[in-house]
Amino acid sequence: VRCLQVLVYTFLALARLNRDYHDVRKSASTVFVVRLWDKIGRALRLTSRSVDFIGDRALLLTLRACLLVFEVAGILVPILLIRGNVVLALPIAWAFCMMLAWTSAFDLAALLVATMAFWVPP
């Protein structure tokens, strides 16, 4: 089970290395971040007027920053798991899975969180 989980995280990391992932206007991560911020905005009861106040430039920079954070976290998780640093890798993976579950891919997130128990030392 550990090997399969490392393979899933490795392929998730490799998917982030393509050219279109870094383009904010084409990336699937942009959709992910927008849906996540939409849920957070609804929970905070932000209006469209307050979002307009932020401005397009700030929103674009926020999208790029989130894209880089997701990319670094996605690449770090399989490397940390392979190297045996489970204490750092599992919280990063858990946070990523929670964000996935909040927005779109509940089945993948549930599977990955359920298999995290196999990494806990005896």
Image (cartoon, helix red, strand yellow):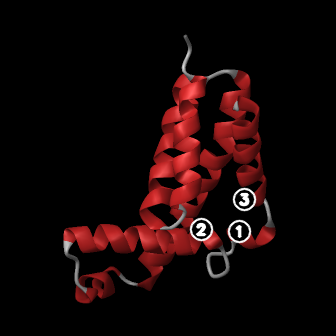
Give the farthest residue toward the top: 122
Q: What kind of element bears circle 3? A: loop
Pick the front one: 29 or 57: 29
Pick the front one: 53 or 73: 73
C-alpha separation, residue under disc 2 versus residue under disc 1: 7 Å
Pick the front one: 19 or 99: 99
Q: Position of residue 40 (x, y in %)?
A: 31, 67
Q: Position of residue 9 (x, y in %)?
A: 69, 45
Q: Are marks 2 and 3 in contact (CB under 8 Å)?
A: yes
Other residues around mark 2 within 10 Å, as few (<14) / some (14–19) / many (≥20): many
Q: In percent of the image, x 58 and y 62: which residue is there?
A: 67
Please name the amino acid that badge 1 sits on. Answer: Tyr
Other residues around mark 3 within 10 Å, as few (<14) / some (14–19) / many (≥20): many
Q: Which residue is mark 2?
A: 29
Residue 103, which numbered label? none
Q: Which residue is mark 1?
A: 21
Pick the front one: 101 or 56: 101
Please name the amino acid that badge 3 sits on. Answer: Arg
Give the farthest residue toward the left: 45
Q: Which residue is mark 3?
A: 16
Q: Are marks 3 and 1 in contact (CB under 8 Å)?
A: yes
Q: What kind of element bears circle 1? A: helix
Q: Are marks 2 and 1 in contact (CB under 8 Å)?
A: yes
Position of residue 57 in the picture relative to residue 22 (left or right): left
Q: What kind of element bears circle 2? A: helix
Vertical placement of residue 72 versus 41, above or below: above
First reached walking from the N terminus: tag 3 or tag 1 = 3
Position of residue 100 in the picture relative to residue 14 (left or right): left
Position of residue 101 in the picture relative to residue 55 (left or right): right
Number of numbered discs: 3
